[in-house]
Image: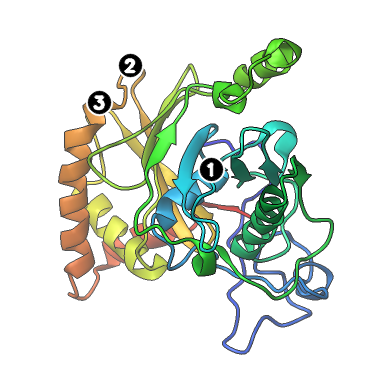
Amino acid sequence: MAKKSRVKNRQAAAAPADGPNPRAACPCGSGKRYKACHGAAGGAFVGRPFEGLPGECDLVALRELVPSATVSLTIKGHESTPVRLGTLLPGAAPAMSRDSGEVWAGLQVQHNYGDVSRDVAAALLQALEARAAGESGIFGLTSAPGPGPRLQDIVTDESLDVTVHEGFDWWLGDVEDKGDFEHALEHANESVLPTERLTSVEAAYWTSVGSKEHLRWVMPEPEDALLTALARLHVAGDDVIVPDARFVGMFRAHGLLAPVWDLPVGTGAEALEEPAVAFKKLLDEALADDSEITPEVRSARAGLANRQVTIR
């Protein structure tokens, strides 16, 4: 469950109701004090930035876990403009107005000003305004965008249809002369790990790293309840997705948990579809269980809490 960047092996600090303590660790997990990180001017931290959006769990996965995927969006006031939200754009651009008339926005970018939803919306609106004026180019942020619309305010779609790609060939799907870009595309494609989204459950992604396979599943339930439910399943021996799989821990990103399983090499995504449905049923039952937790469950829960990797 290695993450290529921005990983901290500790749980982000909880924010009090009236906002984080300026002298305490920033809730983003950077290790800096809040006042020197997202507490700086214009950088207020939002712990669950995609909450309320359709496909919240998938958006977290595309932001942090999936190498190459896209989602088509309809944006309020720009309904006639094709908009594509992607994991990573060429050059890690925040947003692009394309010669083809499309507008793209990226989730995996170099900046983070505290509210990912606001950041993406600000860059996307810049590109949309340029497109409306007939201009093409790359658009982004050099400082915190300040108050303004978030994705929740401008996305009109009621559901999201995620397309996972084998590489980044979609970067050039609207380009006629690809010659100048083929080398860069080849280099980008070499970094893509085979990844597939399960169709039977929401926001669960199989991936292969060659010597290992993993299932990474972003879940929407509150952290405390989910940890307790997973601990109950662990004690009962019901936390194994398929034979010889092993529940190894979880990512913690943008206010949600993403449990991770190591899988036997050769498992593949298709073999996970029915077991994932069965596991979801057991998880829902465990979430609904309000009986007092046993010492074994309490111990298992503490162990799970220590196996969180915070991605900021």
**Residue 135 position by quadrant:** top right
* Cα distance in 3D space between marks 3 and 2: 11 Å
- Which residue does the image show at 55% across and 33% down from the upper left? 67
Q: Of callouts 1 and 3, which one flags the residue occurring earlier in the amino acid sequence?
A: 1
Residue assigned mark 2: 266
Residue assigned mark 3: 270
**Residue 232 position by quadrant:** bottom left
Q: What's the amino acid at mark 1?
A: Arg
Label 1 element class? strand
Label 2 element class? loop
Q: Position of residue 148 (x, y in %)?
A: 67, 73
The answer to the question of whether label 3 and label 2 lie on touching residues, with beta carbons closer than 8 A, is: no
With respect to residue 210, does 202 lie above or below?
Answer: below
Tag of residue 153: none
The answer to the question of whether label 2 and label 1 lie on touching residues, with beta carbons closer than 8 A, is: no
Label 1: how many Cα within 10 Å (few below 14, some 14–19, many 20+): some
* Cα distance in 3D space between marks 2 and 1: 33 Å
Residue assigned mark 1: 84
With respect to residue 43, does 50 lie above or below?
Answer: above
